[in-house]
Amino acid sequence: MKRTVYVVLGALLLVSPSAFAAESIRDGYWEITSQTEMPGMPMKIPASTIKHCYSKEDVKDQKKVIAREKNCTLTDYRVAGNKVTWAMKCTGQNAGTFNGETVFSQDSYASTMKMKSQGHAMTVKVKGKRIGECPKK
């Protein structure tokens, strides 16, 4: 079960940037909160929040942003207005199938990803919001 949670967290890094598929999404410092729902779990998995800096280069090629893992292949990708839908298949340690939908505005997005991995089905809901410029290094 612990390994499954790590797979989910790894997948979150794949899905949250998917909102950057449209030109209207801005680079900058983002706060990304995710909530995982897993049928059959005796308790609710706590939400997690990360902060991540996306550069102009990060958001330039949306397909590479979605499938950042070398063992993952984007199998479907569609943009309709402010909504991006996609499907992905991963092999190796994070083997599984993933599909998601992200609805975004310039400085925020909401995403839902369904995944099947290691015999488990999960739904991950992600909300991101731009909180400013990236911190100086």
Image (tube, grey):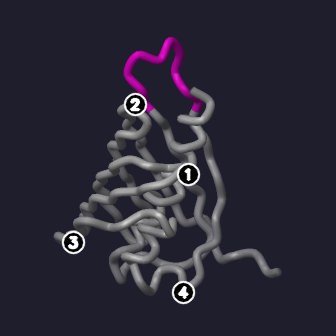
> Which callout, 2 or 3, points to the residue nearer the camera?
2
Q: Quadrant of residue 51?
A: bottom right
User: Which circle marks residue 10 in the picture?
Assistant: 1
User: Which circle marks residue 79 in the picture?
Assistant: 3
Lower position in the chain sequence, tag 1 or tag 4: 1
Secondary element at image label 1: helix
Query: Magenta residues?
Result: 37-46
Identify the amino acid type marked 3.
Val
Write down the residue under mark 4: 56
Task: Farthest residue to the front: give it.
Answer: 92
Give the x, y percent position of residue 41. 47, 17
> Which callout, 1 or 4, points to the residue nearer the camera?
1
Determine whether, in the image, residue 15 is placed left or right of residue 27.
left
> Which callout, 3 or 1, points to the residue nearer the camera?
1
Is 90 a magenta residue? no
Secondary element at image label 4: helix
Determine whether, in the image, residue 46 is placed left or right of residue 23.
right
Identify the amino acid type marked 4.
Lys
> Which callout, 1 or 2, points to the residue nearer the camera?
2
Residue beneath the point at 38% across and 53% down = 110
Label 3, label 4: how far apart the Cα atoms are: 20 Å
Residue beneath the point at 39% across and 78% down = 62
Determine whether, in the image, residue 134 is placed left or right of residue 62.
right
Residue 80's place in the image compared with 137, above or below, is above
Write down the residue under mark 2: 120
Is 39 a magenta residue? yes
